[in-house]
Structure formats: structure tokens, C-alpha cells
Image (spheres, rainbow, N blue to C red):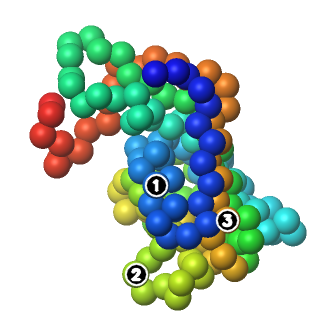
């Protein structure tokens, strides 16, 4: 495996589910999310857990990796938040998933869901998403854990 920067794009719900898998358990702050209304662009700076580098075999002292990444959405008409204090700019958030809500018209909304019940909803003309790693990965000893994990 190499440390080549990951570069993905999504233009439909299937592509978006792939990108969602790659950003699962990414860490961000409310201050690292920005909506450029004039450019119709929404950006999120993430510390992405590199699931593609995890073989699922926990070993004492195993080293995992995170990398700084940018999640970029174009054609964004508006942004709404739920259960997030956007004034708490240093609050760390854990991104669990993103996708198109089941009740949404095709490609009219994208939702980013965070641990603790917070969410960001993007009203979009169409799905235009990019995920790009920035810089080199760093080592971490912490692997994100979930109640459904069986390999602990």
C-alpha cells in the first residue's frame, strides 16, 4: 500500500455512498466548515481515518493513519444545520455518514450526519462532490470504535 493521496468525486447517490465510506469517522470542527454562497460551494476540512489502510486485525500497539482531507461540494443553493452549535468553532465533530435522505427528491439534498445527532443539510442543484487528501498521513494508535464492531 502506498500513501498516494486519495482523490474521489461523486456525481450520483452511488458515488456519494463510496465517498461516505471513505469519510466515515473523520474529525472536523464547526469552524472548519464554510459555505461560499456566491460561488455556491460548501467546504469541510477533515482529519480522515484511512479505512483503506486498516486490515481489520487489531493488534496491541498497531498504528493506524489519518490524513488531512477536503470535502468539497459545488452547486449548493443553501445550508441548514441541526443540533450543531456553529458558534462553538472549536467543537470537534465526528462525521458518521453522508448521503441523500430517503425523502429527498433525487439529488436535491445531501446530508452529513455527525455523532451525537448533529447534521448539515445541503440543498443542491445536483450532486457535485470531491474528496481530496492534502499532505502526508500521520500515525495514530486510535481506531474508531462502534457498538456494532466485532473485532475489538
Tell me, yes or no, whether the two marked residues, 1 and 3, touch with CB atoms within 8 Å. Answer: no
Query: Mark on residue 128?
Result: 3
Can residue 87 be seen here? The reply is no
Vertical order, 100 against 10 (above or below): below
**Eye-nearest disc, 3 or 2:** 3
Secondary structure found at label 2: loop
Q: Nearer the viewer, residue 137 or 13?
A: 13
Quarter holding residue 25: top left
Q: In the figure, is residue 4 to the left or right of 22?
A: right
Secondary structure found at label 3: loop
Earlier in the chain: of badge 3 and badge 2, it is: 2
Q: Which residue is mark 1?
A: 18
Earlier in the chain: of badge 2 and badge 1, it is: 1
Q: Extreme left residue here?
A: 150
- Residue 90, image x and y in percent? 58, 42
Q: Which residue is mark 2?
A: 102
Vertical order, 99 against 101 (above or below): above
Q: Nearer the viewer, residue 120 or 2?
A: 2
Q: CA distance from mark 3 to mark 2?
A: 18 Å
Vertical order, 78 against 152 (above or below): below
Can residue 147 be seen here? The reply is yes
- Residue 108, image x and y in percent? 59, 82
Q: Residues within 10 Å of mark 3 (few under 14, many from 20)?
A: some
Q: Extreme right residue here?
A: 38
Amino acid at each position: 500500500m502506498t500513501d498516494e493521496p486519495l482523490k474521489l468525486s461523486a456525481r450520483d447517490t452511488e458515488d456519494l455512498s463510496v465517498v461516505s465510506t471513505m469519510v466515515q469517522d473523520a474529525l472536523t470542527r464547526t469552524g472548519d466548515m464554510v459555505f461560499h454562497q456566491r460561488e455556491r460551494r460548501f467546504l469541510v476540512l477533515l482529519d480522515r481515518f484511512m479505512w483503506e489502510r486498516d486490515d481489520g486485525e487489531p493488534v496491541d500497539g498497531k498504528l493506524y493513519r489519518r490524513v488531512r482531507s477536503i470535502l468539497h461540494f459545488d452547486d449548493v443553493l443553501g445550508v441548514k444545520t441541526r443540533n450543531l452549535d456553529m458558534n462553538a468553532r472549536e467543537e470537534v465533530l465526528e462525521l458518521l455518514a453522508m448521503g441523500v435522505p430517503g425523502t429527498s427528491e433525487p439529488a436535491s439534498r445531501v446530508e452529513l450526519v455527525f455523532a451525537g445527532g448533529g447534521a448539515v443539510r445541503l440543498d443542491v442543484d445536483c450532486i457535485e462532490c470531491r474528496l481530496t487528501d492534502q499532505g502526508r498521513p500521520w500515525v495514530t494508535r486510535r481506531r474508531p470504535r462502534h457498538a456494532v464492531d466485532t473485532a475489538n
